[in-house]
Amino acid sequence: MEIREAREGDWAQIWPFLRDVVAAGETYCWPRDTTEEAAKAWWMAKPGGRVFVADDGGRVLGTAELHPNQPAAGGHVCNAGFMVAQRAAGRGIGRALAEHVLDQARNAGFRAMQFNAVVETNHNAVRLWQSLGFSILATVPGAFRHPVHGFVGLHVMHRSLEAETHGV
Amino acid sequence: MEIREAREGDWAQIWPFLRDVVAAGETYCWPRDTTEEAAKAWWMAKPGGRVFVADDGGRVLGTAELHPNQPAAGGHVCNAGFMVAQRAAGRGIGRALAEHVLDQARNAGFRAMQFNAVVETNHNAVRLWQSLGFSILATVPGAFRHPVHGFVGLHVMHRSLEAETHGV
């Protein structure tokens, strides 16, 4: 398994599983019927953004994107998104992507990583981020309409990328 | 003083003071040299957004914009931005705009309003939002590079718009 920068041609392999994640509607705020064109623009072409893939011998099994969470005076804090193919769940791909993206973000000079909207019922993700040193700064009550659980909270999660807080 | 929906022609009066607020760099993450074209797109043309102005006998002294904070499954929580002309500070224009926008948001069916990035040294704004029923859910440490104070925090602020929590 190699984590590498995405190439234009990777999209054809990203879209099928990204579409499935979005269509499930349980972890992202995107419209569940997001078109391929909109999804590609959102994932692959964010201002100042970079995209990575988990490449298993030519099969793309996961992807991550990294971008500044705010422009200009807030541009030293990054945000990132992660999508893993359902058929590849449980193999540590999300963690491998996250570790790579955290390293890349630190090397790029970002001082912290912030997630704005982690669905509180997405327990695997919350546990993963916590195990990687993120803390829950706040939970915005009822901010996510979950197709099964109804209104649930969105966590704001954060971790510093500065030297004194490495050691995860 | 009338608070009303913005018209296309209002931009010519909005831009001079919006430019000044952005150029000061103390309250918004926008690039301090944001172009008029970019600013107009950002303020006047957000997806699903509405724009309001404070109109004092034909002089536009302040503006607000209201939009969903997240798409789709997060689209029932709104976000808003406010800009007041420096020359009109201290006249309650920000409060009048905010009260109007809160009413409009409630009438539009939003369940809550969330601010993602209130600069913690912007004490007037923090006090205003608290007096209007907002609470600080979290402060993202060092997330804003202030031109005078250096790295300061960004507050995530929130208030419900549901009936049982009116009464402000």
Image (cartoon, coloured by chain):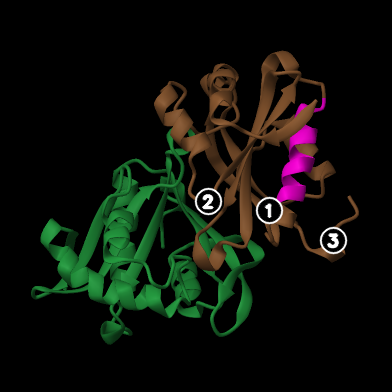
Chain colours: A brown, B green
Q: Say which residue label 3 marks.
A: A165
Q: Does residue B144 sit above or below A82 in this rendering?
A: below
Report in which chain the residue with disc 1 lies: A
- Mark 3 secondary-structure assignment: helix
- What number is the disc on residue A48? 2
Q: Nearer the viewer, mark 2 or mark 3?
A: 2
- Mark 2: which amino acid? Gly
Q: Are tags 2 and 3 found on a single chain?
A: yes
**Subunit of mark 2?**
A
From the viewer's perspective, tell me whether residue A84 is left or right of residue B64. right
* A18, B167: nearer the viewer: A18
**Cβ–Cβ below 8 Å for labels 2 and 1?**
no
Q: Find the residue positioned furthest to the left.
A: B57
Instruction: Judge whether B86 appears above or below B135 on screen.
Output: below
> Which residue is pictured at 40% across the width and 26% down the height?
A37
Using the rendered image of the protein, determine whether residue B147 is visible from the camera's viewpoint.
yes
Farthest residue toward the top? A87
The residue that mark 1 highlights is A113
